[in-house]
Image: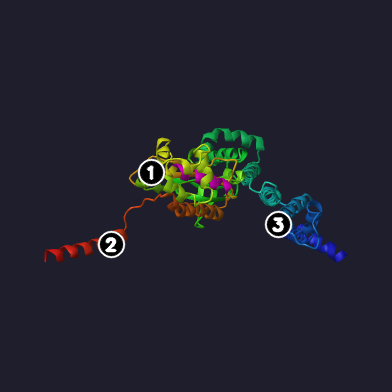
């Protein structure tokens, strides 16, 4: 004991040695506290914050929070030990306290940033509204945490009250508005987009001006990320969704119905009034007799003359439109409580457009295209019994057939002249 007492007196008598020993003691205390936190804070965090989880299952959230806690707890320990070292030079004591204060608020801001990130991840996994993102609000919270930390650090370095620092910021408010103008615009846009639910995760949107069409996979403060259907990623500034035109197809998926609006073109010369011969031909198609009887007000088509059809304006296209409307109404994939219309449009050089307007319950892209293709494949195949022809521009094969028909007649004329 006397030997230790002599060493203590010798160290205290030497100012440089005493200061060095005190600094070394502070460093060792900080390192030991840091190591202790690394091993034991995880258990404390799990018990306090995540007690409902199984203890044998390591949680990533435990490790992340404990790492942030283990960073600033040693700083508190060093700051507390300074009270038992009054012999340190005043300038060194002030410097160490200033460094401890700066590190404390730096680590504290990192801790709250990590807490906000964990809140965002937990909300994304557990929220019933998985398509709703709070990432923008989380990023705003992170910005506020860093701003408060910066103010406190400036207050510590200048040895002034934080109130004075905040009041002095009013003089540079215009500069801050200029520097953070994009952040402020993005904040307002993000709040409007999120609060009004006009855009959510998983929505299919189209922006024709930018040539984008895909799924929203991330809604952040400054940008919204879209995965296009070719698996490329596009990031659009959040404020653009308030100033530019875009289409959100999510309402279509929510309604459970997707619109089919497509036309096919008929050769206008194939449209004519029906007669008894055409009636017999159309009657081979199941369901035509019911529509024809409705058009004739229950009359027997076999006893009605051809002139009657012309006088009453019943054409093969009229019967076909009524038949196609009824056929669509009988399909299981067509919504019966929504519009089902088959109408003739304005004629064009490509023929007479006939538009099919209805809604299918197949909202997914593959099922929707399959239903639409099946409908139009049937339409093109069923036109013949109604004596209707589709219109298309002449092809090379058409010209070849015409030339083949002309060659025999030309050969015959040459033989006669000979």
Residue under circle 1? 272
Q: For this rendering, which residue is in front, 37 or 196?
A: 196
Q: Is residue 307 left or right of residue 41?
A: left
Q: Which residues are magenta?
A: 318-330
Q: Is residue 15 left or right of residue 332?
A: right
Q: Which mark is residue 400?
A: 2
Q: Gap in Å between the C-alphas at discs 1 and 3? A: 79 Å
Q: Nearer the viewer, mark 3 or mark 2?
A: 2
- Residue in view at x 43 percent, y 44 percent: 317
Q: Helix, strand or loop at disc 1?
A: loop
* Mark closest to the chain's N terminus, 1 or 3: 3
Q: Helix, strand or loop at disc 3?
A: helix
Quarter residue 193 falls in: top right
- Residue in view at x 46 percent, y 49 percent: 280
Q: For this rendering, which residue is in front, 32 or 337?
A: 337
Q: Gap in Å between the C-alphas at discs 3 and 2? A: 76 Å
Q: Quadrant of the C terminus?
A: bottom left
Residue under circle 3? 64
Chief secondary structure of the magenta portion: helix
């Amino acid at each position: 004991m006397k030997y230790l007492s002599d060493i203590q007196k010798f160290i205290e008598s030497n100012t440089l040695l005493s200061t060095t020993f005190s600094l070394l003691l502070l460093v060792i205390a900080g390192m030991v506290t840091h190591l202790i936190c690394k091993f034991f804070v995880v258990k404390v965090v799990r018990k306090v914050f995540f007690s409902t989880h199984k203890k044998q299952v390591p949680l990533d959230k435990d490790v992340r929070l404990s790492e942030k806690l283990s960073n600033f707890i040693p700083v508190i320990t060093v700051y507390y030990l300074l009270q038992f070292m009054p012999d340190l030079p005043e300038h060194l004591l002030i410097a160490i306290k200033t460094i401890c204060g700066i590190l404390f608020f730096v680590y504290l801001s990192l801790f709250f940033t990590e807490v906000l990130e964990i809140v965002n991840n937990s909300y994304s996994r557990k929220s019933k509204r998985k398509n709703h993102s709070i990432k923008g609000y989380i990023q705003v919270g992170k910005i506020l945490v860093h701003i408060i930390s910066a103010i406190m650090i400036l207050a510590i370095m200048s040895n002034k009250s934080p109130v004075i620092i905040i009041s002095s910021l009013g003089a540079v408010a215009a500069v801050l508005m200029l520097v953070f103008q994009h952040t402020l615009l993005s904040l307002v846009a993000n709040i409007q987009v999120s609060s009004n639910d006009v855009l959510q995760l998983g929505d299919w949107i189209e922006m024709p001006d930018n040539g984008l069409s895909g799924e929203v996979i991330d809604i952040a403060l400054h940008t919204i990320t879209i995965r296009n259907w070719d698996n490329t990623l596009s990031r659009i500034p959040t404020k653009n969704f308030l100033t530019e035109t875009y289409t959100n197809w999510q309402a279509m998926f929510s309604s459970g119905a997707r619109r089919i609006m497509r036309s096919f073109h008929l050769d206008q010369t194939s449209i004519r009034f029906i007669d008894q011969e055409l009636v017999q031909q159309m009657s081979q198609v199941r369901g035509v007799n019911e529509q024809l009887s409705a058009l004739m007000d229950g009359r027997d088509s076999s006893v009605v003359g051809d002139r009657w059809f012309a006088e009453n304006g019943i054409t093969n296209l009229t019967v076909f439109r009524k038949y196609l409307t009824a056929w669509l109404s009988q399909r299981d994939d067509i919504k019966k409580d929504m519009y089902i219309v088959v109408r003739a449009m304005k004629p064009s050089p490509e023929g007479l457009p006939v538009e099919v307007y209805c809604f299918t319950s197949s909202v997914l892209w593959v099922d929707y295209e399959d239903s639409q293709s099946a409908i139009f494949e049937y339409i093109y195949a069923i036109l013949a019994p109604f004596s209707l022809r589709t219109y298309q521009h002449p092809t090379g094969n058409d010209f070849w057939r015409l030339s083949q028909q002309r060659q025999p007649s030309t050969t015959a004329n040459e033989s006669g002249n000979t």
